[in-house]
Image: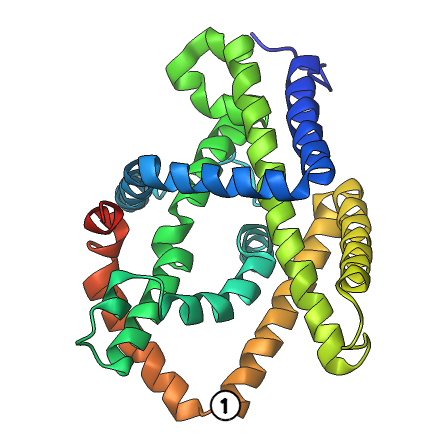
């Protein structure tokens, strides 16, 4: 079995430290070479594993629909245990942790990119309205219900493992029904180490994109000059990342009830204020029409088509 008193797993920590610091040092020592190699790796992953990513996401999505109807009455905590937070607080924390700054970056940038990024836009016989609608729908498919499926699979598995069966709140606990006692050996160490690496890499990506967007906003407001050099822009971005990291670290250290809940609620409310301002200051009737239209488009094209779409023929050209 596992040891309740263990606070730090040296094997898992070593995997995370070695891989992450090795990657960071490589990028700092050889920025151009590392960029080229990482771009090639990403292209290879897309080429060889699109079927796995898209197929698993679709399976997760439909499996979760089954779980909701079959086991929706089952509590993730003990049967007699009251909820620790309100539904609104839970939603704010999940939203802030799940999409957070990524939604504000890609919510605008992704539809614009999808206007030219795929076969639908390049066919030459579709109107711009059709291309724009497809681009918007691809974005909603990535950030909508089906895009949340991988998050929810992990949340349900870890919630049951940690709160219902009193297993450690680590990623390896999700595999206990499959691996049994092997979960607490070297296989579990590899799972947790890999989870740390990919989680930190994902957080760093969102943090970097957020810092870039924040600095651009500072320049738009006149808080940072437009005519500064790229090195000076990078310095401001690095300073922004440090400030955000300090705030995030203080939030984590202060605990779930104090820092994370409060910051998540504030972030969610500010996001709703931004959404309201866009809604009332833009063409409101157009936005209402587009919302209704996108719901129908999503139900028709995203659930069964884009959920499984790998662009197989486009990859052989």
| Nearer the observer, 10 or 159 | 10
Say above or below: 234 vs 177. Answer: below
Horizontally, residue 227 falls left or right of residue 193, namely right
Horizontally, residue 27 falls left or right of residue 152, namely right
Residue labelled with disc 1 = 282
Q: Dot 1 lies on which element? A: loop
Q: Which residue: 19% across, 49% down?
A: 313
Can the viewer see residue 166 in this picture? Answer: no
Q: How is the image coloured?
A: rainbow
Q: Which residue: 20% across, 77% down?
A: 126
Q: Which residue: 35% across, 62% down?
A: 117
Label 1 packing within 10 angstroms: few (<14), some (14-19), many (20+): few
| Nearer the observer, 106 or 86 | 106
Q: Position of residue 273 (x, y in %)?
A: 61, 77
Q: Position of residue 261 (x, y in %)?
A: 68, 53
Picture quadrant of residue 53 = top left
Say above or below: 62 vs 217. Answer: above
Horizontally, residue 232 falls left or right of residue 122, namely right
Can the viewer see residue 255 in this picture? Answer: yes
């Amino acid at each position: 079995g596992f040891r309740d008193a263990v606070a730090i797993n040296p094997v898992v920590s070593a995997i995370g430290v070695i891989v992450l610091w090795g990657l960071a040092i490589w990028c700092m020592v050889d920025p151009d070479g590392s960029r080229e190699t990482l771009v090639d790796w990403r292209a290879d992953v897309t080429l060889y594993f699109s079927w796995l990513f898209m197929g698993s996401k679709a399976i997760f999505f439909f499996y979760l629909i089954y779980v909701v109807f079959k086991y929706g009455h089952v509590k993730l905590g003990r049967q007699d245990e009251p909820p620790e937070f309100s539904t609104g607080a839970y939603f704010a924390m999940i939203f802030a942790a799940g999409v957070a700054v990524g939604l504000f970056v890609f919510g605008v940038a992704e539809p614009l990119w999808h206007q030219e990024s795929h076969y639908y836009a390049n066919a030459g016989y579709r109107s711009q309205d059709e291309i724009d609608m497809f681009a918007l729908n691809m974005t909603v498919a990535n950030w909508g219900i089906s895009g949340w499926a991988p998050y929810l699979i992990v949340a349900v598995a870890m919630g049951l493992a940690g709160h219902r069966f009193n297993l450690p709140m680590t990623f390896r606990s999700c595999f206990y029904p499959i691996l049994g006692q092997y979960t607490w050996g070297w296989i579990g160490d590899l799972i947790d180490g890999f989870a740390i690496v990919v989680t930190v890499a994902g957080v760093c990506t969102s943090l970097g994109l957020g810092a870039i967007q924040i600095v651009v906003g500072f320049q738009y407001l006149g808080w940072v000059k437009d005519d500064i050099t790229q090195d000076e822009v990078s310095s401001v971005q690095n300073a922004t990342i440090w400030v955000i990291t300090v705030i995030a670290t203080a939030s984590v250290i202060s605990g779930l009830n104090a820092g994370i809940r409060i910051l998540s609620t504030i972030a969610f409310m500010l996001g709703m204020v931004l959404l309201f301002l866009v809604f009332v200051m833009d063409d409101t009737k157009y936005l209402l029409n587009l919302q209704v239209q996108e719901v129908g488009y999503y139900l028709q094209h995203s659930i069964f088509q884009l959920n499984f779409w790998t662009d197989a023929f486009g990859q052989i050209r």
